[in-house]
Amino acid sequence: MNKQVRLAVFISGSGTNLQSIIDRCADGTIPAEVALVVSSDPEAYGLVRAEKVGIEGAVYRRKDFPDGRAADDYLLDLLDRHQIDIIALAGYLKMVAPAIISRYRGRVVNIHPGILPKYGGKGMYGHFVHEAVVKAKEKETGVTIHIVDEIYDHGTVLACEKVPVFPEDTPDELAQRVLKVEHALYPRVLKELSEEIAKEKTS
C-alpha cells in the first residue's frame, strides 16, 4: 500500500499559497505530495500552476449540481479516487460542506490572513481583512492556521504568527507583508500534520 501522504489543495484565485505548498512538497520540506487541486473558479490561475507541474485540477461549484447531496457525493468521490489524506484550503472562498468536514474531521485546514477570532467570520477574507485592520489602526495583525469545522473561521488554531502594522500602511502593503508570513507558516503546519498522518499510516 502507498504510504505517501496525499494533499488536496482548495483554491479560488491565483494560488500563491498553493505554489508555496507545491514547492515545499517538491523539496521535501513537507513529506507529502499535492495530488489534487480543487478550484471554485474555472478561471483561477492556481489551476494553471497545477497543470504546469502535472497535478490534476478540478472545478467544483455547488451550483453546477442539482442539489447539495449530489454536490457532496461528487466531491467525496473525487477525494476518494485521489486517496486524499489532508485538505488544505488556500484562498478558498466557499464554505466547506458538513459532509466533507465529517469525513475528514481534523484533516481540513485553512489559512486566514488575520488574527482569529477578531478578524474572522463570514465576509472577512483576503483584502477585506487587511482593510479592516488598517481602518482600526491596529499595531499588529497576523496569520492564523486552524482546523476547519462547520462554522467560518472557528476551528482549533494550529498556529498563529503576528505581523506588524505600520501607521503608514495601505491594505495592499500590509497584504504583501502578511503573504510572506503565510508562505512560510503554512508549509510548517502542513509538515507537522503530514508527519502525524504518515505515522498513523505506518502503525
Image (cartoon, helix red, strand yellow):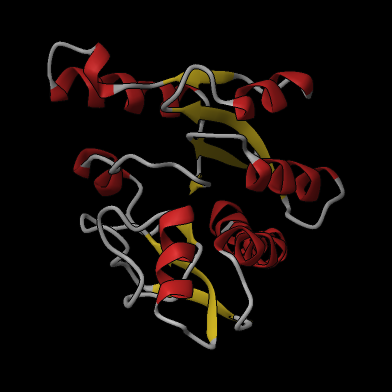
Q: Residue at x 53, y 47 (%)?
A: 90
Q: Is residue 52 left or right of residue 16?
A: right
Q: Is residue 152 left or right of residue 21?
A: left
Q: Residue at x 62, y 61 (%)?
A: 186
Name the one closer to the observer, 28 or 119: 119
Total labels drawn: 0
Q: Residue at x 68, y 21 (%)?
A: 48
Q: Is residue 57 above or below residue 176?
A: above
Q: Is residue 154 above or below residue 30?
A: below
Given the current orientation, which residue lies at the most extreme right position?
27
Residue 160 coordinates in the image, percent (x, y): 53, 78
Residue 85 coordinates in the image, percent (x, y): 50, 44
Q: Is residue 43 visible?
A: yes
Residue 182 coordinates in the image, percent (x, y): 64, 62
Name the one closer to the observer, 169 or 201: 169
Given the current orientation, which residue lies at the most extreme front position?
168
Residue 175, located in which quarter of the rendered image? bottom right
| Figure quadrant of the C terminus | bottom right
Q: Is residue 39 left or right of residue 149?
A: right
Q: Is residue 4 visible?
A: no
Residue 50, located in which quarter of the rendered image? top right
Q: Residue at x 58, y 41 (%)?
A: 7
Q: Is residue 72 left or right of residue 77?
A: left
Q: Is residue 147 above or below residue 150?
A: below
| Figure quadrant of the N terminus | top right
Residue 117 coordinates in the image, percent (x, y): 32, 76
